[in-house]
Image (cartoon, rainbow, N blue to C red):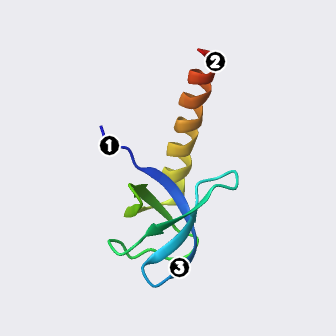
Amino acid sequence: MCLAIPARVVEIQDNIAKVDFGEGVLREVNVALVEAKVDEYVLVHAGYAIQVVDREDAAETLRLWNELLSMEESNT
């Protein structure tokens, strides 16, 4: 199963963007496959932005991820 996580684009230089996954988690990803702009959200898989997504979809996906993670933490 492949997973892609939404992240907000903070800055772009050439084909490399600095993205924010939330809570201060910043990473560099390749954005050559999409036409992303600063402050947009992208789905990131294996170091590549594979799709631009709207803010509402990104927020809902992140909410669901956090819910799943909190359930996992409570089961350990």
For mark 2, what is the residue? 74
Q: Which residue is mark 3?
A: 12
Q: Which is nearer the N-term, disc 1 or disc 3?
A: 1
Q: CA distance from mark 1 to mark 3?
A: 25 Å
Q: Of all residues shown, which one is farthest toward the right?
A: 24
Q: Residues within 10 Å of mark 3 (few under 14, many from 20)?
A: some
**Looking at the image, residue 73 lies above or below residue 58:** above
In 3D space, how far apart are the residues under numbered discs 2 and 1 (Cα atoms)?
24 Å
| Front-most of residues 60 and 70 | 70
> Mark 3 to mark 2: distance in Å?
38 Å
The secondary element bearing badge 2 is classed as: helix
Element type where label 1 sits in the image:
loop
Q: Quadrant of residue 46?
A: bottom left
Q: Position of residue 75 (x, y in %)?
A: 59, 14
Give residue 40's position: percent from left, percent from top. 52, 68
Q: Is residue 34 above or below residue 2?
A: below
Residue type of the residue flagged with mark 3? Ile
- From the image, which quarter does the C terminus lie in? top right
Amino acid type for the residue under numbered disc 2: Ser
Q: Which residue is mark 1?
A: 2
Residue located 58% across and 40% down the image: 63
Q: Which residue corresponds to the image point at 38% horizontal and 54% vertical from the top-left?
A: 45
Find residue 13 and report its horizontal and vertical position in percent: 51, 83
Q: Secondary structure at mark 3?
A: strand
Callout 2 crowding tier (Cα within 10 Å): few <14, some 14–19, many ≥20: few
Tell me which residue sits at (56%, 49%) in the image: 59
Residue 46 drawn above or below residue 39: above
**Label 1 is placed on what type of residue?**
Cys
- Sooner in the amino-acid sequence: mark 3 or mark 2: 3
Left or right relative to 47: residue 71? right
Q: Is residue 20 above or below residue 39?
A: above
Residue extending furthest toward the bottom: 14
